[in-house]
Amino acid sequence: MGTRIAILASGEGTNAKALLDASANGALGGGEVVVVVSDRREAAVLDRGDQAGVETVFVDPEPFSTRAGYGDELVRVLQGHNISLVCLAGFMRILPPNFIKAFPDQIINIHPSLLPAFPGAHPVRDAIEWGVRVTGATVHFADEKVDAGPIILQQAVQVLPDDDEEALHARVKEVEHHLYVDAVWLFCSQKLHIDGRIVRVDDSEAPPSKLKEPR
Ligand code: GRF
């Protein structure tokens, strides 16, 4: 059986769409997106899931007074779908330890900077304000620290002199969309091996960031 994937997202969902398209095209190494979960009822990502014919679930944070309580509810929903890979795609909540422990080495996140530079909620703005010439995108395993888990793939993006946050983030997202698909393909193809902080990539077939053809 292929890897059953859940996407957790709060917003626009362009990364979710890249994963949904790849799933529909059989380009996730046998992985399949089976549910899209959001903490925001109005999030556009839920429409993306609907359009793809994938189940969508709004998990309301409102009734939960603690992060752990909400985390338990998310675990319950995902376990109900037999999920073995959780893809965070702009999920704007810190996941509690009980959630991380429920899916050991099975949660991956995408972040619009070259981590460990610019973790946190405004990495694109922070990169511009710091004056860096190069930023980029990172896909990494999620652990209990925010934006800090072992790195799977990264790709650089030039910062141009006239960039504002919107323009730069749009170019970073273009990179993110194929980087995330590559990373999920590698995970589902069982080509990722975590060794402490280091993720070893079995790239005997093709360099991961050069994967162009659906597989
Ligand atoms: C992306 O830049 C992602 O790296 C970050 O949040 C943004 C989500 O964008 N975690 P979208 O909703 O996928 O368009």
Image: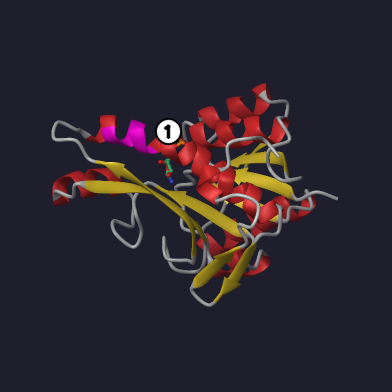
As rendered, which of 40 and 104 lies closer to the eye?
104
Residue 109 point in image, percent of width and height: 51, 53
Q: Residue furthest top?
A: 51
Image: magenta residue range: 168-172
- Determine the secondary structure under disc 1: helix
Which quarter is ligand 1 in?
A: top left
Q: Residue furthest bottom?
A: 196
Q: Quadrant of residue 194?
A: bottom right
- Which residue in the structure is indicated by mark 1? 174
Residue occupying image coordinates x 46% and y 52%: 93
Q: Is residue 106 left or right of residue 95?
A: right
Q: Is residue 169 magenta?
A: yes
Q: Is residue 180 visible?
A: yes
Residue occupying image coordinates x 27% and y 29%: 167
Label 1: few (<14), some (14–19) or many (≥20) C-alpha neighbours in 10 Å: some
Principal SS element in the magenta part? helix
Q: Is residue 150 left or right of residue 50?
A: left
As rendered, which of 208 and 5 lies closer to the eye?
208
Q: Quadrant of residue 68?
A: bottom right
